[in-house]
Amino acid sequence: MKSIFLLTIPLLVWSNYLVRIDNISKNDIMLLNSLGINTIENFGDATLALVSKKELVRVGQIKAHYEILDVEPMNNIYYIVSVEDKKTKEKIAEIGEILSVHDGLFLIKISDESKIVELNKLKTELKRIFFTPIVVKPKEYPTINVIRDTLIQQMVNIVSADTIITIVQRLQAFRTRYSTTDSAHACAQWIKNKFISYGFDSVYTETFSTSYAPNVIAIKKGVIYPGRNYVVGCGHYDCTSQTPTTFAPGADDNGSGTAGVLEAARALRNYQFKHSIRLIAFCGEEQGLLGSYYYAQRAYNMSDTILGAVNLDMFAYSTPNRDSLTIINDTTYINNLWLANYFSACADTYTMLKKKVWTGRRPQSDHASFSRFGYSAIQGRENLNVSNPYYHTTGDTIGGGFNALTMCYEGIKAAVATIASLAKPYVPTAIDERLSQTGELKIDIYPNILRNTPLKIDFYMPRTEKVYLSIINPLGQIIESQIINVSQSKITQININVNLRPGVYFVQLQERKNIIIQKIVVLP
Ligand SMILES: [Zn+2]
């Protein structure tokens, strides 16, 4: 196919090409990037690149096999479609033009947006192709231990099975939440009002397209990091079926995840955290992760620090003895194993959840939008070995597609524990009192009661700056002083190993005219 195409068409009359590159290594991707060629999507183990006329020659410089799939792609609409049954595969060919089949995935081109609803009537998972470059990031595996915290256990215990059922019933009652419908808009408004009733600091809808209902976002501001440094809990509220625009109850896909986001809001509302928390109900997921892509792209462009995103999608269906949650570490873009393991540890510490971490390529839900931009994200999903017969049908109702309440309930608890642990509960005490805190320098000193433990200090600065640190005893004597370079818009963490005798000390930090003083106690 490739050679015929290459020989018969004078390729250089166009200015942009959609190219599939096979068996490409990480080094090859780096090489491509250094040559100015942007990889825009991973297609199974192949990579799709948007290549200009000039760059086409350079693609040949890497040794991988490549194929030109289309010309002037930016004028067109493409989808990666994952399908399981044969019948559906045949139908896909009637809806769009199949450009490539790879790793069991179809790359199709559709003539206009109206074809999307036809694809949504089938049992398919869609992923839209966007033309922005994938963010290639070096591997980062934070290791964080989970230590049981009674406050987090309190939050987890607020999650209620009855409330989950009530929410899913209400969601079903919209008849459909298909992204383009009036009732999806009504549902967005209902979710927004729920968040407002829970007293969140900021609740708003985010419109990503005039054709679709919006994302709904609720923000809980962190005490130390009230800005763009946060943990995400999310799940899409839109759904589909054979009759998407009139009846699509979507109890499992994804009433379960929507209930998760709303229950997390109810469980976390009366607590304070060091980092901010954003709970997001996405729309446009069924049309190829449209809402979450829009959100994550903006977050990336605004240099947001996202400590981790927990995505809940389809986790309330089971067959006998398969009621264990799959924690998906999707490796399509980056490895998210640390977060999957962290979720698993939080589940063990705070819940009765049966679960298993799964690693592989599975970018078919909103977590993938975060990872595409280099953010750690996981999905909680029902057992991958169980296929829900009601998936994307009118039978996805409570009792049909939604039949495993315990897994859903425990899964939501585990999500609450993970979000709260990442955001770190904040407990104001007399000892923690900030004697003065001014300007843009934010610090977090912990623990503030020490015994043979190093003192850890987190700094946050909107610009690169030198910070002068001193530890002073009650007599005003400086016991320790250091100069620390704080990097811009990032959290800098330092450990201070000073041998302090038991007593009270003041940790003083100075940056330009700003001074922060915090008391610490060293126990005998
Ligand atoms: Zn879904």
Image (cartoon, grey):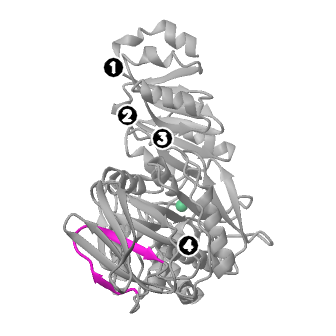
Three-letter residue code for mark 2 = Asn
Give the residue type at disc 1: Ser
Q: Which residue is mark 4?
A: 418
> Over which residues does the magenta segment extend?
432-446
Please rate how many residues cluster around mark 4, counting C-alpha atoms within 10 Å: few if below 14, some from 14 to 19, many from 20. Answer: many
Magenta run includes residue 439:
yes
- Indicate left or right for 406 with 467 as reference: right
- Secondary structure type for disc 2: loop
Left or right, 79 with reference to 511: right
Observer-nearest residue: 108 or 375?
375
- The residue where tag 1 is placed is 15
Residue that badge 2 annotates: 76
**Could you tell me residue 125's position as x and y percent?**
56, 51
Circle 3 residue? 136
Ligand 1's quadrant is: bottom right
Q: Is residue 382 above or below residue 88?
A: below
Disc 3 and disc 4 in contact, CB within 8 angstroms: no
Pointer 3 or 4: first along the chain: 3
Q: What is the CA distance from the residue labelled 3 to the residue labelled 4?
A: 26 Å
Structural distance between the alpha carbons of marks 2 and 4: 40 Å
